[in-house]
Amino acid sequence: MPKAVRLSEKLATFSDHWKPRVVATFNGHDVMVVKLKGAFVWHAHPDTDDFFHVLKGRLRIELRDGAVDLGPGDLYVVPKGVEHRPVADEEVELLLIEPEGTPNTGDPSTAADKLRI
C-alpha cells in the first residue's frame, strides 16, 4: 500500500547537524531533510544549482555579494557555480533537492555521507 513520507517523522529520527538524510528519490534527484546549526563552509557546486526550502527555523545563505534570509516556508536556489555558505544561528530544518550523488560541500573528498531513512 502506498505511504506518504512524513517529513516531521523523518526529522525526529536524528539530531546531528549537516548530515542530509535521503527520504525519497525522483527523476535522478535526492529529496532530503537535514538539520543545520552554525556556519557551513564556503563552497560552490560547479554542475548544479543548490535548492534550500526551510521547514522550521531561520537560515541565512551568505553569498560573496550579500545574503538571503529565509524563514519557514521560504525557499531559495543558489545558481550553479555561485559560492555560498549557509548559516543557522539556531537549529534549522530543511528540505533539499539535488541530483543524486551531489556532494554537500561541492567536493566529494570533504562531503558528508548521505544516509537513506
Image (tube, rainbow, N blue to C red):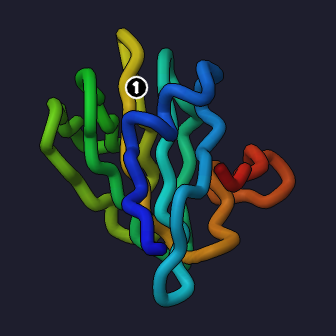
Q: Position of residue 8 (x, y in %)?
A: 38, 35
Q: Position of residue 36 (x, y in %)?
A: 48, 26
For residue 117, side relative to residue 42 (left or right)? right
- Residue at screen point 45% across, 52% down: 83
For residue 50, side relative to residue 10 (left or right)? left
Which residue, as the protein is rendered here, is positioned at the far bottom?
27
- Quarter of image, res 4: bottom left
> Would you call the spot at circle 1 few (<14 residues within 10 Å), some (14-19), or many (20 or more)?
many
Which residue, as the protein is rendered here, is positioned at the far top?
90
Q: Position of residue 71 (x, y in %)?
A: 15, 31
For residue 20, side relative to residue 2 (left or right)? right
- Residue at screen point 22% across, 36% down: 67
Report if residue 82 is visible in the image: no
Residue at label 1?
Answer: 87
Which residue, as the protein is rendered here, is positioned at the far right?
109
Q: Position of residue 66 (x, y in %)?
A: 22, 38
Q: Is residue 77 above or below residue 20?
A: below
Which residue, as the protein is rendered here, is positioned at the far front?
1
Query: Helix, strand or loop at disc 1?
Result: strand
The residue type indicated by label 1 comes to Val
In this rendered view, identify the residue nearer to me: 113 or 88. 113
For residue 51, side relative to residue 10 (left or right)? left
- Residue at screen point 69% across, 71% down: 101
In this rendered view, identify the residue nearer to me: 95 or 14. 14
Report if residue 6 is visible in the image: yes
In this rendered view, identify the residue nearer to me: 112 or 81. 112
- Residue at screen point 20% across, 51% down: 75
Q: Is residue 47 above or below residue 71?
A: below
In this rendered view, identify the residue nearer to me: 95 or 76. 95
Q: Is residue 81 above or below residue 37?
A: below
